[in-house]
Image (spheres, rainbow, N blue to C red):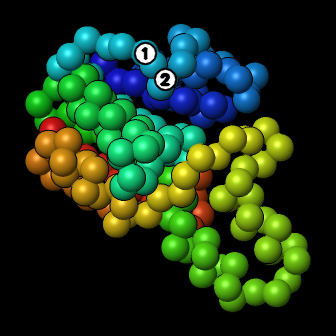
Amino acid sequence: MKLNLGCGPIYMPGYINIDNQSQWNCKVDREEDVFNMDWDENTCEEIVVSHLAMYIMGGADTEYKPNQMRILVNRWFGWLKKGGKLVMETTDIRKVAQLLLNTTNPDILNEEMKAIFGWENTYGHKWSWSPELLTPIFQEAGFETVELGDSVFHPNPKNFIIVGTK
């Protein structure tokens, strides 16, 4: 069993594609809020989470704000079978910051700001990530290996993939 959580417009054959459709009128196999859903433990071969991370709160200040990413990665880890993979793709805030600092072109500035705050149909970004922020969360969840790579769902040099194997 394979899950595509927060699938948006990326419908993946062979996966159970799940989204609450709040921002996309898209094809899904199951309409549900991926932040609150439950799944059976040790049942998934793979969980794909593409460009959902920016809607997941992070931060180290757990006394005042829960680190929602840590909670979700731990939950998803439990759903995976031994050898299963959590595949997450998101934008690297460091690369966006570099692009912002290296230009005065208003068109580029506006485009890169969308990576932080969202587009018209992707409002509500809560956090920005980098490999250095996500890798420890994957490791703390118990993933045997954590690997980084180039984006595949939204190919762009400012995006990256992190894959944790249980």
Q: From the viewer's perspective, is 18 left or right of 22? A: left
Q: Quadrant of the N terminus?
A: top left
Of residue 41 and residue 43, the one placed in the foreground of this image is 41
Q: Residue at x 26, y 11 (%)?
A: 40
Q: Which residue is mark 2?
A: 34
Image x and y of residue 17, in percent: 51, 21
**Quick one: which residue is furthest to the front in this view?**
63
Q: Residue at x 69, y 88 (%)?
A: 102
Q: From the viewer's perspective, is 81 left or right of 158? A: left
As drawn, the label of residue 37 is: 1
* 31 to 35, vertically: above or below: above
Of residue 38 and residue 60, the one placed in the foreground of this image is 60
In the rendered structure, which amino acid carries the disc numbered 1? Answer: Met
Image x and y of residue 90, in percent: 51, 53
**Quick one: which residue is furthest to the right in this view?**
106
User: SS for tag 1?
Assistant: loop
Of residue 1 and residue 58, the one placed in the foreground of this image is 58
In the rendered structure, which amino acid carries the disc numbered 2? Answer: Val
Residue 103 position by quadrant: bottom right
Distance from label 2 to label 1 (Cα)? 5 Å
Q: Answer few, some or many: residues within 10 Å of disc 1's Cα (few below 14, many 20 plus, some between 14 and 19).
A: few
Q: Answer few, some or many: residues within 10 Å of disc 2's Cα (few below 14, many 20 plus, some between 14 and 19).
A: some
* 3 to 121, vertically: above or below: above
